[in-house]
Image (tube, grey):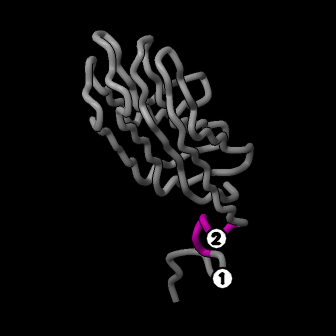
Amino acid sequence: MQLFGPTGSRNFPTDRNPTRIAVGAFAGVVGGASTTFATYTVPAGRRCTIWSATVNGVVITVLAAGQTSEQIIRVTKPGPILTEQVHDIIQAAAAVGTRVQHDKSTIELAAGDILDVIVSVTAGAGVVQAGGGLSGVEYDA
């Protein structure tokens, strides 16, 4: 008989001491501010599969001329090495109701990797209602 994988009841990596990860928030971001809505660092000896990381923003006070808003889902690997998964911009002078929403699925992270969900607004009178979060499972490496 040939066996093509491990035998037993814990054959898949996500079965190895799994922990559910869910982090997120929602708030207004004013001109000149940056808000990290979710951050997660994979502990030593663990790995993580992020099933969904999302970031969104909607202009609730008109952005001034030259004022922009950035929506970022960023992974930082030890080194540090930055790998942006999503980076979008609400353009200057955007009208009320202008929306941006992004979802990145299946991000594989190793020990020491950091995932951040960030929204920033450059200086000016405009305000962006924003939010973001992440959801996944952490398991033994």
Q: Nearer the viewer, residue 35 or 108?
A: 35
Look at the image and tell me in which quarter the C terminus lies: bottom right
Residue for point 52% across, 89% down: 1
Q: Nearer the viewer, residue 132 or 2?
A: 132
Look at the numbered discs 1 and 2 and tell me whether their residues touch, using CB distance below 8 Å: yes
Residue type, label 1: Ser
- Residue labelled with disc 2: 15
Whether residue 106 is situated above or below residue 56 in the rendered picture: below
Residue 18 screen position, x and y as percent: 68, 65
Q: Nearer the viewer, residue 125 or 70?
A: 125
Q: Which mark is residue 97?
A: none
Which mark's residue is nearer the viewer, 1 or 2?
A: 2
Please give the range of residues in magenta.
11-16
Residue for point 34% across, 43% down: 101
The mark that comes first in sequence, 1 or 2, is: 1
| In this rendering, position of residue 113 left or right of residue 86 | right
Q: Residues within 10 Å of mark 2 (few under 14, many from 20)?
A: some
Q: Residues within 10 Å of mark 1 (few under 14, many from 20)?
A: few
- Residue labelled with disc 1: 9
Residue 137 quadrant: bottom right
Element under disc 1: loop
Residue for point 41% across, 53% down: 105
Element under disc 2: helix
Residue type, label 2: Asp
